[in-house]
């Protein structure tokens, strides 16, 4: 079983920066694409972006101007940084692994971490 | 962005029922379609990928079909553990997008 673990502050003030880390299995970080996905409470799923260790990155255009996803293979971590947050960024944030197939789907997910944007 | 529309948004069913959920894409996505199941308080779990391929470990009562713009997830005989919310997701073009979800409730 592949275990992914998100971590980071559960509360962020409006206009500040949301920063999360996902720890992934060390033997796989350089072999897979890693994504962030979020889900506002009681609502649907939104893909945020993905990264590959080579530097291949893709962001959802709706967040691109505020978003940075990075990878640190030495620490087995994938990170998300979202600036200038508002209440609309309140959500459960998941990291997920993209399966090695032509079709991009997520075969393993972290348990998710709730981030609330509030003063 | 490609819009994914699921129907119905919710349905009520009984154990043993055959359940069908539909997902429609706003443009052709070939077979770049996956289905997920999500139970309250847990992360989504993939059931079907490439429109009709069953993910390893998923019971065979789940099946997927369709191509281009119209897709279906079928549960052949609903089990107690299948009451959950189901999402479709396209990966034909970025940004990858999900349907709004279909909640399967107890009748």
Image (cartoon, rainbow, N blue to C red):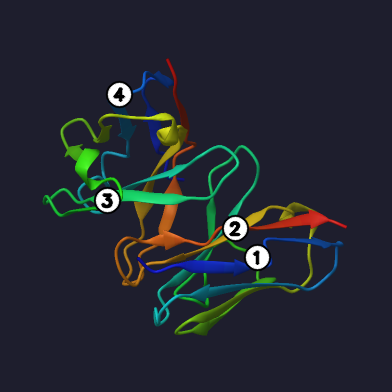
Mark 2 near mark 1, Cβ–Cβ under 8 Å?
A: no
Q: In front of the other: label 2 or label 3?
A: 2
In the picture of the structure, the residue carrying the numbered disc 3 is: A50
Q: Secondary structure at mark 4?
A: loop
Q: Observer-nearest residue: A54 or B91?
A: B91
Q: Is residue B57 above or below residue A103?
A: above
Same chain shared by disc 1 and disc 4? no
**Residue B102: x and y, percent?**
65, 60
Drawn side of residue A55 relative to residue A65, left or right = left
Query: Can you tell which mark lies on residue A15?
Result: 4
In the picture of the structure, the residue carrying the numbered disc 2 is: B101
In which chain is the residue bearing label 3?
A
Q: Quadrant of the C terminus of chain B?
A: bottom right
User: At 65% from the left edge and 65% from the top edge, which residue is drawn?
Assistant: B59
Residue A68 can be seen in this image: no
Query: Can you tell which mark lies on residue B59?
Result: 1
User: At 44% from the left edge and 84% from the top edge, which residue is drawn?
Assistant: B68
Residue A62 can be seen in this image: yes
């Amino acid at each position: 079983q592949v275990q992914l673990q998100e971590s980071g502050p559960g509360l962020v003030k409006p206009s500040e920066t949301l920063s999360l880390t996902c720890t992934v299995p060390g033997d796989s970080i350089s072999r897979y694409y890693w994504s962030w996905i979020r889900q506002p409470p009681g609502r649907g799923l939104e893909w945020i972006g993905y990264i590959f260790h080579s530097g291949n990155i893709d962001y959802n255009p709706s967040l691109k101007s505020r978003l940075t996803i990075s990878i640190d293979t030495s620490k087995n971590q994938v990170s998300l940084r979202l600036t200038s947050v508002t209440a609309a960024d309140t959500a459960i944030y998941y990291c997920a692994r993209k399966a090695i197939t032509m079709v991009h789907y997520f075969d393993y997910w972290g348990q998710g971490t709730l981030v609330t944007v509030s003063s | 962005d490609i819009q994914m529309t699921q129907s119905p948004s919710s349905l009520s069913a009984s154990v043993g029922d055959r359940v069908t959920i539909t997902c429609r894409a706003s443009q052709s996505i070939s077979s770049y379609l996956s289905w997920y199941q999500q139970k309250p308080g847990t992360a989504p779990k993939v059931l079907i990928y490439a429109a009709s391929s069953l993910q390893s470990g998923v019971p065979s009562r789940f099946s997927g079909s369709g191509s281009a713009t119209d897709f279906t997830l079928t549960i052949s005989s609903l089990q107690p553990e299948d009451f959950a919310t189901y999402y479709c997701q396209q990966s034909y073009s970025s940004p990858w997008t999900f349907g709004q979800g279909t909640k399967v409730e107890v009748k």
